[in-house]
Structures are given as C-alpha cells and as structure tokens.
Image (cartoon, helix red, strand yellow):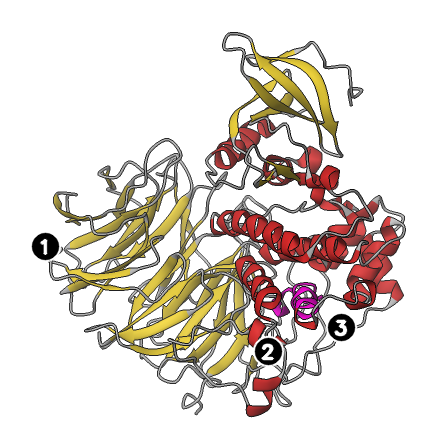
Amino acid sequence: MASPTSRVGQQFGNYRLERLLGRGGFAEVYLGRHQRLAREAAIKVLHTYLSDREVEEFQREAQIIAALDHPHIVRILDFDVQQGVPFLVMDYLPNGTLRQRHPKGERVPLPTVVSYVAQVASALQYAHEQRLIHRDIKPENMLVGRRNEIVLSDFGIAAIAHSTSSMTEQVSAGTAPYMAPEQIQAQARAASDQYALAIVAYEWLGGERPFEGTSIEIFAKHLMIPPPSLRQKAPSLPVEVEQVILTALEKDPGQRFRQIQAFARALTDASQRGQQPNHVLLQASPSLPVAAPLPPSASNTPVAPPSQKTVAEQPLPPAAPASHASVTTPQTAITASTDFLPPPAKTPARQLSRRTVLIGLGVGTGGLAGAGVLWWMNRPRSSDTTGTASTPAQPAPLYTYGGHTIDSINIVAWSPDGKRIASGAPDSDDTVQVWDASNGAHPFIYHGHTGAIITVAWSPDSKRIASGGGLSDRTVHVWDAANAAHPFIYRGHVQQINAVAWSPDGQHIASAAGTALDKPPDKTVHVWDAANGGHVFTYQGHTSYVNTVAWSPDGKRIASGGSDSTVHVWDAANGGHVFIYHEHTSHVIKVAWSPDGKRIASASWDNTIQVWNAANGGIVLVYTRHTGYINAMAWSPDGKYIASGGDDNTIHIWNATTGTPVLSYQGHTRRVQGIAWSPDSKRIVSCGDDKWVKVWDVFGVLPNRAG
C-alpha cells in the first residue's frame, strides 16, 4: 500500500492530485484539479491492485454506483483503473464530515439528529431500492454539502470493494462499532444499514456509542448484549425516542423496521408528537386490510414489524463441480403452521455461547474473513423452540440441482406438461439449463445469450422457451425446448429484458424491458408474434421501467407491474381499456393471475403481496409476513395457495383466499430469487443466491391435500 502522501502530484485520469484530504481503511481521498477545466473534484484512490478479471468487475460495479442520482448521495463523476489501481472521481464538498462537525463525545440536539437521520435514510432508502447496501454507515462518511445538507459518501467503497476479492476481507471487517450482528456473520442486508444508522443516532443523542472495547469485544457485544439504556445517558430524552432507537438496534434484522425510511419517520413522529411506542412503531397502512389480525394483547405492545417463525434447517450439500449438473437430496425441514404471528411481547435476543461467538468471529484465523465466518455461514441451524410448531409436518425434499457455475440463480420455470424445469443464471454463467423435473437428470444447456439470463418462460404446449437477457444482451430468444434448436431473436427492446410471458394460445409473447445505464428507462411492454417476432403493438402506460408481466388465463388481458409502484391491467389485443392499481408504495416486482382469472396478486418491495379483484382493483387481502424485499411469487395452478420468497431467505406458502400462512420453507441460505409450482400443484422448484435449485414436495402437507 502506498504511503498517505506519496500520490500528491500524481495524475489520475484528467486530474492532478494536489493534497490529501483524508484516508481510511479502504482508500485515500485527494483534492484533484482537472488539467483542462481547472475544476476541483475529490479523487478516491483505493488501497488495492486489481487483476484483469477484477478490473472488469470494478468497472461494472462502478458504473452501477455512478448511476445513483439522489440529492443526499455524493455524485461519482468518473472512474477508471490506472496501472491496476482503481479510483473514483467525486464531487468535492469542502465543508467536511459530521464527525468533524460533532467530535466524539459531543451530544447533538434531538431536532438536529432527527434531521440528519431523515436525510441519510432518504439516501439509503433510494439505494436499497436499487438493491445496493452501503455497509459502512458512520459519521465519517456523512459529508456536509454546500447548502448545509447531509450527503452520504463511500457507496463506491462499500459496494465496489465488496465485489473484488482482493478487498473482501477489509470490507467484511467494516467499522466495528457500527456493524450489525448479521454483518459480523458476513450476511449484510438492507437492515444492516438501519442498525448502523441507529448506532450513529444513539451516539449523537447519548454522547457515546453503545458498545466500546477491542474489536473482538465489540463484535461479541453486538451479537449478545442489549444496548445500554439511552435515557440513562440522556435523561431528558423522550421514552418514545429511545424505543424507536432500540427497535432499530434489534439483534434480529427481522425485528427492526421494515424499511429504513420507516425508522426515520418513526423517529420524527416520536420527537415531534411524543406518541406512545406502540403508535410510533405501527407500519401497516390503515387503508389496507391485513392478512390476519394481531391478537388483542399485541395491540398494546411496542413490537417491531412481524417476522416469521424459525424452522429447522439441515446442512446443505457441498458445492457441485462446475463442469456438470449435480443432484442431491438434502434433509431440509418444512414446518407446517397456521400461526406465523410474532409473540405478543418482544422476543429476547437468542443467547450465543462464548465458543459460538469466538468461532463466528474467526478469532485466531485473521478476523471476519477467516475460516470462522465460513463455518458460521454454512453452519447447521438448530430449531428455535419459541418459533416452531409443536409437531411440524415433514414433506419430502426431493433433490437439489447444481448445474450452474455461479452462486446466483435468477429464475426457474416448470414446463406446462410437468416433465421439465428450466433455470437461468447471470454473469459468468449466462445460460438457460433444461432438465428432467423428476430427478434433475439429462440436462441440456442453451448458450445463445451474450449476457445474464433475467427471465424464462415456457410456451403453453411445452415445445418452446422464451428467454430474456440482461444489460449486455437486451434480447429475447425463442428456441426449441427439446434441443435448443431453431432459435429466433427479438431485438425490439434496447434495454435489459425484465419479463416475458406467452399468451395462453401460444401465438404471442409480451416482453417488458427495464433500465439500462446508457439509456433512459424503457417503460414499455411489447406484444409480438411468437412464431416470427413480428411486432403487434407497444404498451406505453407506465412512468418507470416495467418489472413483470402476466397474461390472463383467458388471454384477453395483460397485467404489468413497474417501478412506478403501480400495476396496469389492459386489453391484450390493443393495449386499451386500462385501469391502474395504485395501492403499492414501492417497486412492483411480480404479478400473477389466479387460475380462474378473477384475482391478481402483486408483490412489491414495500414488503407486501396484495391480492385484489382483477375487474376493478378492489383489495381482497394484503400479506405482510416477509421481513425483507419480496423477489418471487407464484399462484398454485389449483388456485388454493400462493408461494412467495425474498431477501429473508424463506419461502412462505399461504392460503390465497384468506392469507393464512401454511408453510415456511428455509432450505435456502441466501435470498430467494425464483419460485414455480408444478402443474399438478404438488411440488415447488425454487432458486436463489446460494447456487442451488431446489425441488421439494408439498403434497400431503398442505391442508386438504393429504391422502
């Protein structure tokens, strides 16, 4: 690593480095001056040298970060790699950081803290909706803008460095006093940023951080010890404010606020109106019915948003060789339950043994990135006796398919004849794989795309597959499902293909495109001839990019959901006769029609799945049991159940009429990306970010299925 002042006078890109502004664990920041325009910028030079492979990954990640456009996020103006050293060019903000404005030990007035939290939470909410996690929230990374606004920095470090193997250890380590328990366990998520921001707010209000000591001592306290009373440090602080802070500091991320902006709003409410804690913490919209009411005792209890109960999980099989598909039969438990509600009182944090903490922290093995964390991430999970049903049903896990060569599997689709499954993967894999649904055997691989596979759909007769590509591909391929022969390519979109859907008669395809970093959002759905790609018409009703599209069972209507938080239902013949469903508050990720065509289910990053009348948008129920973003959702072909999964690593199966939860499946160790039912509604295939495609049997376990 170069010494802190050795780069002064050097030139990076068009900028000459004039003086050192600061340095941290990941980078040095210099004041740079453009050689032709004489403009000043902050140049962040990372402490690493990248291989050729890492250069490509850095450039891809940096391009994503540079696309962030928010008033409370520092703009990245340029980026490059110079002699193996990556650097970022950012807006220069000369007013320093909030650490400089409020040195350690200084208490900050409550109204000021509320303002700071609201601005930072606004930036983080935006980033989370782009599926980016900061991972290093602290006062040093909060800059003061030219108009005294707060601007969050170091997204470039937190996201870009995390993607390069040479810096993974440093980023995993993070900044100990602000790290959430799950981040210490190398499982950072959006809720980890909320925890860190709550630590910062605690420090400002109380004059000191809740946990001090050596790094190992701090990590152990994050994992095991509740934070000390904030009001003992600041007796004049309203109890409502303390309760909001402590909720955001829950050990279990599922017990924190569902979104970071909800934390900021609750803090604002508590400071301004002195509400009771239970009023501050309510997250449900009063205009929407919930799937199942809380018990009477819960209405007066200051609990965080509900999380589903824990079920037993056995170790997953070892990773399969990249050269061929593997089929395994993990012993994964699925717990049947009719009660997913949290206990009326706040659940105590799970107590960890000293041995578990030391192993999890990797003591003696180089810290968080050592063998201890690898063990922690892959450890068997014991059953939580407070969370499981007393006599859980045990449907049979059938097998695990491991044919892809990358950890993240985007999509799965079951053929309508029930005989085969198709799965698609991104990045270096870039394949669609088709295999025997009964045992995972006889796979063949479609290599036609030039980039990530985002979406896959079978034709109604199971003879063809349509697959959509990512940013480096931007096409839809239609090909023979038996042997990948005779493909034709639809090139009508100029951006990533987010969704494809066949008409029930197999004659047409609807495709929806997303965003591209080099072009404005597409915002359209194309309807075209499935035989030759002939364009029929384009639907242009959305105001942001479209994430999902589904054809009604009778073929007369199409439902499309987008990042404008709406679902549009329109005439499949010409795009007319539109009505718009407005009840979501964030990106709509999936839509599905009930098999009888009378209802639509829509899944959103507002952490709800809403079921509503397909004719007029009247709400039937709202399912709110997931504790993270929802990425996948499918209606069973028999119409009785909906399966949903997401960033909480679980799949819920619940009654499509009442919203009553039935099963929770925890066979995946990372977020769930795709779900599909078998045509007979007896099996489910699921995929996610843990490499594995899992096929499991629910027949005989779901109500009215036994026998």
Indicate whether residue 250 is drawn in magenta: yes
Give amino acid for label 2: Asn
Q: Where is residue 153 drawn, in percent x and y?
A: 61, 37
Residue 462 numbered tag: none
Residue occupying image coordinates x 77% and y 52%: 107
Identify the residue at image location x=53%, y=35%: 61
* Image point (42%, 76%), residue name: 286
| Closer-to-camera residue (612/483) | 612
Q: Earlier in the sequence, mark 2 or mark 3?
A: 2
Residue 278 numbered tag: 2
Mark-to-mark CA distance, 2 and 3: 23 Å
> Residue 242 at x, y = what percent?
70, 67
**Quarter of the rendering containing residue 109:** bottom right
Residue 320 x/y as whole percent:
60, 51
At numbered mark 1, what does the secondary structure look like: helix, strand or loop?
A: loop
User: Mark 3 belongs to which amino acid?
Assistant: Arg
Query: Is residue 494 in the magenta section?
Result: no
Please say whether residue 703 is visible from this viewpoint. yes
* Residue 305 visible at all: no
Q: Earlier in the sequence, mark 1 or mark 2?
A: 2
Query: What residue would you read off at disc 1?
Result: 574
Callout 2 environment at 10 Å: few (<14), some (14 to 19), or many (20+)?
some
Image quarter (top left, top right, bottom left or bottom right) of the C terminus: bottom left
The amino acid beneath tag 1 is Asn
Mark 2 lies on a secondary structure that is helix
Task: Give the magenta part as a residue range.
Answer: 241-255
Quarter of the image where the N terminus is located: top right
Which residue is under mark 3? Answer: 350
Q: Compute the Cα span from label 3 to label 1.
A: 56 Å
